[in-house]
Amino acid sequence: MDVGVVLQCDPPAMGVVELAKRAEAAGFSHVWTFDSHVLWQEPFVIYSKILAETDRVVVGPMVTNPGTRDWTVTASLFATLNEMYGNRTVCGIGRGDSALRVLGSRPTTLAELRECVRVIRELGNGRSVRLRDRDLRFAWAPDSRLEVWVAAYGPKALALAGEVGDGYILQLADPDIAAWMIRAVREAAERAGRDPAAIRFCVAAPAYVGDGSQESMAHQRDQTRWFGGMVGNHVADIVARYGADGAVPTVLTDYIKGRQGYDYAQHGRAGNIHAGFVPDAIVDRFCVLGPIEHHLKRLAELKELGVDQFALYLQHDAKESTLAAYGEQIIPAVA
């Protein structure tokens, strides 16, 4: 199993680069970032610096969306980085949340997402694509290679991931929910005539390494409760579209009943005051907390389900110690 890390593009940008360099030295395979250009700095600028100062890690957004850039621009960004640094990028993409809602827009449709995946993947792999009655191709990037991994929760989005994604991103680390989601993606791939085993599966969630004392666990939960609030935004969309029964596991729809609004100014940040509705039990299920043995156990469960990569969100007050603990004790055990 690969282990990646997910960073926010908070200033100073060179601080993000330094964390990425430490991640590579610790054995992490991927460095992902948020992609929400109003809330944080522009990630593709930072990717170029990360790639210039590392040798091995793959970089990409977790996740970009079809709405904030022209699709050909997004594809060109990836292809340019690949030409400069040797095919070390991956495109994580979804319908969009913070990046669009901060602008007063809504997530894009699944039809738009499907078409966007097609355009970015074809151009990012040096192939021609038909778009707006034009045949387009990056003649300057014949050797670019790019995988597109689709993030999804709802049934139609999961089907899309299985039908067109090179990989699937699930942003929570509960093994029971992961099993349900992965099965849905695999079944969709099979219906579409694809090989389900060819799809890469990535589970992404906050990880905090600390002791198992009651006081420490309470602190770790408070530092990572924001994640349940973030996931709740996507689940609220699913409930609005499909209702609260049956579309996704009820553990997802049940916990958001106390949700009241959301402030994107605190998106992805420890201490988010709009995540108070998230109970401790959900934090424990969605995140990976506690001593080393807790992390090893959860990652073993995910690996058994067919998860190829665990990507840990590092948005809390123990970034460096958690990064070091993974490098010294967890990555060697799961690699």
Image (cartoon, rainbow, N blue to C red):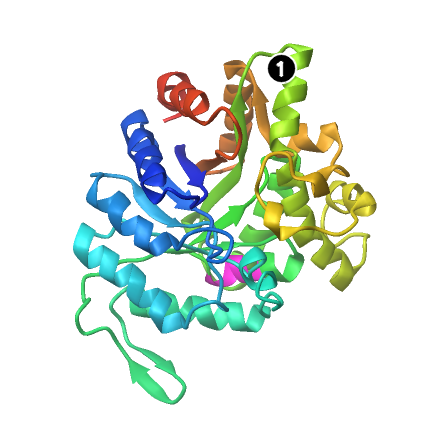
Relative to 141, does residue 283 appear above or below in the rendering?
A: above
**Residue at the (44%, 47%) spot, across then down:** 197
Is any atom of residue 330 visible in this view?
A: no
Figure quadrant of the N terminus: top left
Residue 223, quarter of the rendered image:
top right
Question: Between residues 118 and 182, which one lies in front from this camera angle?
Answer: 118
- Magenta stretch encompasses residue 109: no
Is 21 on the left or on the right of 245, as rendered?
left
Is any atom of residue 90 visible in this view?
A: yes
Magenta span: helix, strand or loop, mainly? Answer: helix
Q: Which residues are magenta?
A: 159-164
Residue 299: where, in percent of width, then height? 51, 27
Q: Amino acid at mark 1?
A: Ser
Question: Which residue is tagged 1?
Answer: 216
Residue 79: where, in percent of width, then height? 26, 62
Figure quadrant of the C terminus: top left
Assess disc 1: are there few (<14), some (14-19) or many (≥20) residues with their C-alpha within 10 Å of its C-alpha: some
Label 1 residue SS: helix
Residue 268: where, in percent of width, then height? 57, 43
**Residue at the (38%, 21%) spot, across then down:** 324
